[in-house]
Image: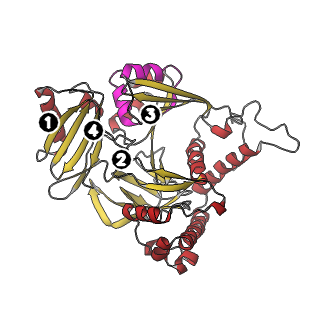
Amino acid sequence: MRFDFSDFPFSGKAFSAKPMTFCEPDVTRFFSAIIELAALETGNRKAREHWQTLQLRNLLAHAANRSPFWRRRIGARDGLGGARLSRLPILARRELREQVASEGSLLEPSDRIPVRGHSTSGSSGVPVRFFVSEMNANYNVMRSIAQYFLEGRDLTLNRTQLNYARTPQPRGISVERAGSWLGVLGPFISGGAAKIITTRRAEPQSIWRELSRDPIGYLSAAPRVIETLLQHVGPDEFKRAGAAMLIIVAEELDASIRSRFAAVGIPTRNTYSCEEVGPIGAECERHPGRYHVATSNVVVEVDPDDEIRLGEARAGKVLLTHLHSYATPFIRYDVGDLATLEDRCPCGHDGPTLSNVVGRSKTLLKHRDGHLSQFFVRAREMMAIAPFDEFRIRQTAEAKLVVEIGGRESLSAEETAAFIRLMRSHAGDDFDVEVRAVAAIDWGESVKRLGFHNELL
């Protein structure tokens, strides 16, 4: 092993002009934190697990000391000296709401750590409200940037983020630009520029014109946006517009679309995270669908008592312990997802790995006999039937699907029948399907705007 920064894209003024100083303090702290994260997640397993044990012990002691709710669950002895997760009860959303409502933040003003309220997107039901510390926000930024270092990605490329508007507004596109997407490291590294495009029921052609106006670089977007754009431009045009990688958020990107982009040299990476704890796992470069757990942030368990079969694999309830959750503790938190947990990755990564990750209330369909199956309808399948702005599919009863087609005042009988046939081709003939044309879909407090939502789970 050797340190060699000869190929590193330092800026011309990377180093400090101050006496007896190499780098500016803010840069040093941020860069040091990234190195620490990389060392922790890719280094010696025994050292990493020892660190996690100590961090877990600290968290349990804090929770037991500050919270009657957690003292009842943990016990004073375990809170101060034990760190055995398997003995602790699973934390449900209902119980989390109870703790937050009755006790508020467990960080006090005397701790001198800034705290703010936060909530989930509401995509899996009623939004969960909780508290986060300034450290949580800082970690999320650092861990996101650290992934570029871990994979050796080109830091000089731009980063483009393509979002939906979170509030109802007239059709259109807004654009925000920043200097470097590397944040604090901007003066230190000659990084690419940041660009955030927010769309409000805009036409795909308009979105593409803005997207391709500058070299795209790393494109962060939800699958449905990518699928919509593919109705008008191909992956080769993304390549010509400078796209280097797709970073997918909210849902899985269809494997066939991954392959189309891979064929022109544009790889895809999914991220596994949630609002409550931040990063959970980063998709393996060599084995798509497998996620290296962000062990610097979470301990992940899979409850074997709640398994279901997904094809040839078995998946269980994902339980998360957020090691830095001092404002609102998340200890054995049932996030509502299912996954398979393995001790290491086939790529050689010596750390816990998740696969077969599915959102229980996002992509699973419940059948009359009680069994669950994955349910995924591609945006391009929907758009092949009729033009529209957006869509949402909901399972509202044991054998009923409601399909909302946004941006339409009405649908023809032929279009309605085609949507019904499409739903039954994915769900089965035993489902009743109601198709509704609506001017705009009422997404409520949800910001993820998932194509399918199961209201029964």
What residue lies at 46% left-to-right and 35% top-to-bottom?
A: 267
Q: Nearer the viewer, residue 422 or 456?
A: 456
Q: Nearer the viewer, residue 167 or 336?
A: 167
What residue lies at 48% left-to-right and 43% top-to-bottom?
A: 285
The magenta span reads 203-232
Q: Is residue 87 visible?
A: yes
x and y, in percent, of residue 111 in the image:
65, 62
Does label 3 or label 4 sit earlier along the sequence?
A: 3
According to the picture, the residue beneath numbered tag 3 turns out to be: 163
Q: Secondary structure at mark 3?
A: strand
Q: Amino acid at mark 2?
A: Ser
Q: Secondary structure at mark 2?
A: loop
Q: Is the Cβ of the residue at disc 3 closer than 8 Å to that at disc 1? A: no
Q: Is the Cβ of the residue at disc 4 closer than 8 Å to that at disc 2? A: no
According to the picture, the residue beneath numbered tag 4 turns out to be: 392
Whether 5 is drawn above or below 138: the answer is above
According to the picture, the residue beneath numbered tag 1 turns out to be: 421
Crowd band around label 1 with a 10 angstrom C-alpha radius: few (<14), some (14–19), many (20+): some
Q: Nearer the viewer, residue 165 or 150?
A: 165
Does label 2 or label 3 sit earlier along the sequence?
A: 2
